[in-house]
Image: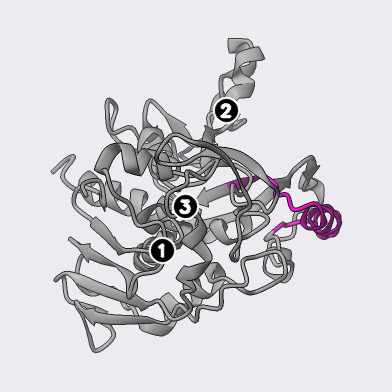
Amino acid sequence: MSGSTFGEILKVTTWGESHGAGIGAVVDGCPSGIEISEEFIQSFLDRRKPGQSKFTTQRSEADSVRIMSGVFEGKTLGTPISLVIENTSQISKDYSNIKDVYRPGHADYGFDAKYGFRDYRGGGRSSGRETAGRVAAGAIAIKALSQMGIDICAYVSQIGEIKADPSRFDREEIKRNSFCMPDKDAADQAAKYLEELIVNKDSSGALVECVITGVPAGIGEPVFDKLDARLAGAIMSIGAVKGVEIGDGFDVVSKKGSENNDQFYSEDGKLYKKTNHAGGILGGMSDGSDIILRAAFKPTPSIYQKQSTVNCDMENLDIEIVGRHDPIVAPRAVVVVESMVALSLFDLILINRTSKM
């Protein structure tokens, strides 16, 4: 299978299947001297792992990471870093009834059409479990960026029709509720909404917003490797994402140039913008202001309602999915968004070091 490697200088390859022996990642091209530990990486995996509330899949995985290579005495060596996470809670029999059936909203049919064969246990490589390898690798990039003064903060800003109020934004609240929302009132409303959906055997979509601060101007390339293009590609590679916005995003359609342009001014010899409609990126390069992106996550396709589908013999039938599934994907995906943003940024920063002498 091609397409499992991400990046140019900082290359990350994820491997493994949802119900295989394990999953993980290999990080190549990482500079030496970055302080990293299993405990630090684990703190990010713990934000992603299942079974933490009634609003996530009850699959019980410790998601314990082991660093197999590339780190010595707490620092990266500059050699390939191998990260391994064992699967310990596979219940593959939950998927035996869909062995020859294409689940609505899933990649089953695409896999059969492409390969003529698929791992039906939890979706194999197309399972959301694949993202654990990204998070393990992303933790290394996040640590490196933090040493450069770059901060990445993602959170769920909307669940269904329930939106977090920006005037009540509380970064600490993101850690306190099950939905990673920065607004407690919105999180309480979301809990009631999700409880209703669980009773009705349904699921919800959501919006994840990410704010990146401290990125110097000039990161990214002006043509194909634009910073916004790389970020959009990275976020769109997360399985449940169906749309990405940078800055004002699709709202620019209804604006005039006089409304959308971010006017510049200088203060103490430094350049600033009066507004940030561009979301921190102009001409494919960072402009020194906060980078703002949003990702739209579709509702979890594995719902417990009866649905119409076909099998591999093209026979029409009904299916009722069993197993352990999240009624909403986005809260566990917040750290995945941060990880993909960090991997994209760190790679482009490494590339940028050859831009001038």
Q: Earlier in the sequence, mark 1 or mark 2?
A: 1
202 part of magenta stretch: yes
Asked which quadrant contains residue 326, the reply is bottom right
According to the picture, the residue beneath numbered tag 1 turns out to be 142
Q: SS class of the residue under badge 2?
A: helix
Q: State left or right for residue 200 relative to residue 316.
A: right
Residue 39's place in the image compared with 175, above or below, is: below
Residue contact at pointers 2 and 3, CB within 8 angstroms: no
Q: Identify the magenta region.
A: 181-209
- Mark 2 or 3: in front is 2
Q: SS class of the residue under badge 3?
A: loop
Residue contact at pointers 1 and 2, CB within 8 angstroms: no
Q: CA distance from mark 2 to mark 3?
A: 21 Å
Q: Nearer the viewer, residue 33 or 253?
A: 253
Residue type pointed to by label 1: Ile
Residue 15's place in the image compared with 203, above or below, is: below
Q: State left or right for residue 335 relative to residue 327.
A: left
Q: Nearer the viewer, residue 183 or 283?
A: 183
For residue 214, the mark is: 3
According to the picture, the residue beneath numbered tag 2 turns out to be 249
Task: Estimate how packed mark 1 is, as few (under 14), some (14 to 19) or many (20 or more) residues with alpha carbons within 10 Å.
Answer: many
**What is the x, y in percent for residue 318?**
61, 43
